[in-house]
Image (cartoon, rainbow, N blue to C red):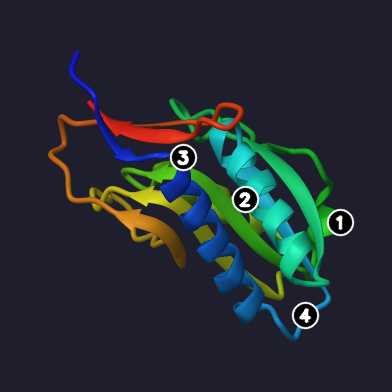
Amino acid sequence: MNQNIILNNQEIDHKIKRIAYQIFETFADEKEIILAGISNNGYTLAIKISSVLSTISDLKVTLCEVKIDKKNPFNPIVTSITKEHYKNKNIILVDDVLNSGSTLIYGVKHFLEVPTKKFKTVVLVDRNHKKFPVKADFKGISLSTSSKEHVHVVFEENNNYAYLV
């Protein structure tokens, strides 16, 4: 199968840095945020954003891993921190690719079961093929693709890239 690189390591690093600055600007008046990354790549992206935020701001960042059954999002969602920990907090839900919007919207629904202060979403690649009314507040790149094409993001040590197949 032919793969076309759409983002290389340097471009992904640049996008992560820009997203971190956007998050900092949006939450500059706050003391704490929760970065909730959807397993696996969303959580990896959240870790990378958190790393940049720690160098540019004094925001207290709590990482949260969100486990969603992407094939059956009605199954219970599991988070690495309790609902009490993110109640009345600023939450940013992070995923690598926004495709149909299913994973993101069920993730948002889960966090809205408790009151939140402010809620934002982050994706590295927005494919513009949404079936659900969800948007990314912060995104690395918007990409118009055919419904038959797929975007994959690979996070490796010093070799991050996204490609289209």
For mark 2, give the secondary structure.
Answer: helix
Classify the position of the N terminus by image quarter.
Answer: top left
* Near-viewer residue (74 or 16): 16
The residues tagged by marks 3 and 2 sit, at their Cα atoms, a distance apart of 32 Å
The residues tagged by marks 2 and 1 sit, at their Cα atoms, a distance apart of 14 Å
From the viewer's perspective, is residue 24 above or below residue 8? below
Q: Which residue is mark 3?
A: 9
Look at the numbered discs 2 and 4 and tell me whether their residues touch, using CB distance below 8 Å.
no
For mark 4, give the secondary structure.
Answer: loop
Nearer to us of marks 4 and 1 is 4
Q: Which residue is mark 1?
A: 85
The residues tagged by marks 4 and 1 sit, at their Cα atoms, a distance apart of 16 Å
User: Left or right: 156 with respect to 98?
Assistant: right
The residues tagged by marks 2 and 4 sit, at their Cα atoms, a distance apart of 23 Å
Picture disc at residue 110: 2
3 or 4: tag closer to the N-terminus: 3
For mark 1, give the secondary structure.
Answer: helix
- The spot of residue 95 in percent (x, y) is 51, 45
Q: Which residue is mark 4?
A: 30
3 or 2: tag closer to the N-terminus: 3
Q: Residue at x 67, y 50 (%)?
A: 36
**Extreme bottom residue here?**
29
